[in-house]
Amino acid sequence: MLCPSTVRTYRKVYAVYALTFLILLPILCNELPYSKYYTHDRSKRREVDARRVEAENQERVAAAKFYLKKNGPYSRTFRQLRHRLERKSKPELVITVVTVARKSGGESRPGPQYLTQVVARFAELLTQQENVVFQVCNVNTPPEGHREAVYLSRYVPVISRNSSSTEPVPTSAHIHKFEKEKQDYVFCMERSLELQPDHILMIQDDAVPRTDFFPVFQHLLKYNIEGKIVRGDLQPNPEKWAFWKLYYPERWQGYGNEEKLLLELICSGLIGGSLFVALNCGGFMERDSRRRTTVFVLGFFYAVLLCLAIGRQYLIELRRLSVHTYAVVDAPDCCIPAVLYSPKQAAAIVQYLKGQTCSSLLPIDLALDNYVHSSGLKQYLVEPNLFHHIGIVSTLHAGIKNPVDF
């Protein structure tokens, strides 16, 4: 027969379970798409979410245009951005935004103006940075058809694939769109390499950096990319890597059957079990080992179920509390909205991609993953994401993407 104190402890634990999973989480997680408590019919919500994404995009566009208008192309901010490209000194970082015109969905409607948002955000962030070159790489055919990029060339450096280039410009009539995307990426990377930087950051024009991008990036650069803490000392990092991904789709950042994600859940369970014992059994000095073990198991499963119910996508957001809490993990295959390269690997990747023919079965991101696997190098991912992906309108596919992911 259980003693009264044990009964009270079990009742308290069961009450916590009921309060959490039957009352609090259904209320708090009802609008979180990656939560188990998301109850909306996704097909019915598509139109509502599409309107929400459109409204949010218009707000960002208005804010970006206000920033550009307030500063103007001849302000100190934009004069510095243009001047940095003319310097002879070797830059620490070259940021290249690969862009192509997107369809507006109608003759009278403007396009989504993603590039304007990216340029305005980077211009704002780069005011506090030294020796960083920013440029837009217009790969539209013809270049002047990308009116947004032409307009922004008043503000920031814009390079284009034009008729004066020694390399023929591919057109959709003569080349597959996925192959053109690869050739465009190679062209922009080669132009970035000409500046002889320490690092190259290749960005698609629908990836907007977060406001804390540079503090986090500089910390990663110092302690994970260029250096490494060994026995308490910062030493040069001898590890060879192919590239670092700074964005990965949230939809695929949940818990799966990967070993590292299962270990994450187990660690969360161990922490939860320990906390339950500490709070309900007076710590591990409790003499009743059966009671202690039962409470630990209940705490273990409570923490595991809590993580699964909320969704890993939302839990890793807690890592934004400090630059020290961001995680570096092995990068999954797919997706290159924002990727960091070293010049040596960028040059090798350029040569590799020139020998590949991309198609719907082998898009450029999978070609890059094949390079990683064939070279034996590592690819890393920073969690949580350092960029927002806002491109619901695709350059490769008709229609729009699932608005729930934006």
Image (tube, rainbow, N blue to C red):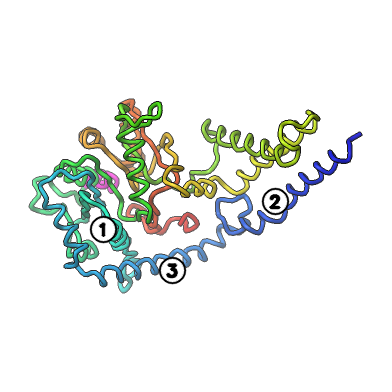
Q: Does the segment drawn in magenta span residue 135?
A: no
Please indicate, yes or no, whether residue 142 appears anywhere in the rendered image: no
The residue carrying mark 1 is 127
| Rendered location of residue 236, percent (x, y) | 29, 30
Identify which residue, 283 or 247, lies in the foreground.
283
| Rendered location of residue 329, percent (x, y) | 43, 36
Q: What whole-number distance in Å separates the C-alpha atoms at marks 3 and 1?
A: 28 Å
Numbered badge on residue 55? 3
Q: Residue at x 47, y 64 (%)?
A: 50
Name which of mark 2 and mark 1 comes first in the sequence: 2
Q: Give the quarter of the figure containing the N terminus.
A: top right
Q: What whole-number distance in Å separates the C-alpha atoms at marks 2 and 3?
A: 34 Å
Q: Residue at x 77, y 49 (%)?
A: 15
Identify which residue, 95 or 35, lies in the foreground.
95
Q: Amino acid at mark 2?
A: Thr
The residue carrying mark 2 is 20
* Helix, strand or loop status at disc 2: helix
Q: Amino acid at mark 3?
A: Ala
**In the image, 174: left or right of 375?**
left
Q: Does the segment drawn in magenta span residue 183?
A: yes
* Helix, strand or loop status at disc 1: helix
| Rendered location of residue 366, percent (x, y) | 35, 38
Q: Residue at x 32, y 55 (%)?
A: 395
Q: Residue at x 29, y 60 (%)?
A: 124
Numbered badge on residue 345? none
Mark 2, mark 1: which one is toward the viewer?
Answer: 1
Identify which residue, 128 or 115, lies in the foreground.
128
| Rendered location of residue 386, percent (x, y) | 39, 49
Name which of mark 2 and mark 3 comes first in the sequence: 2
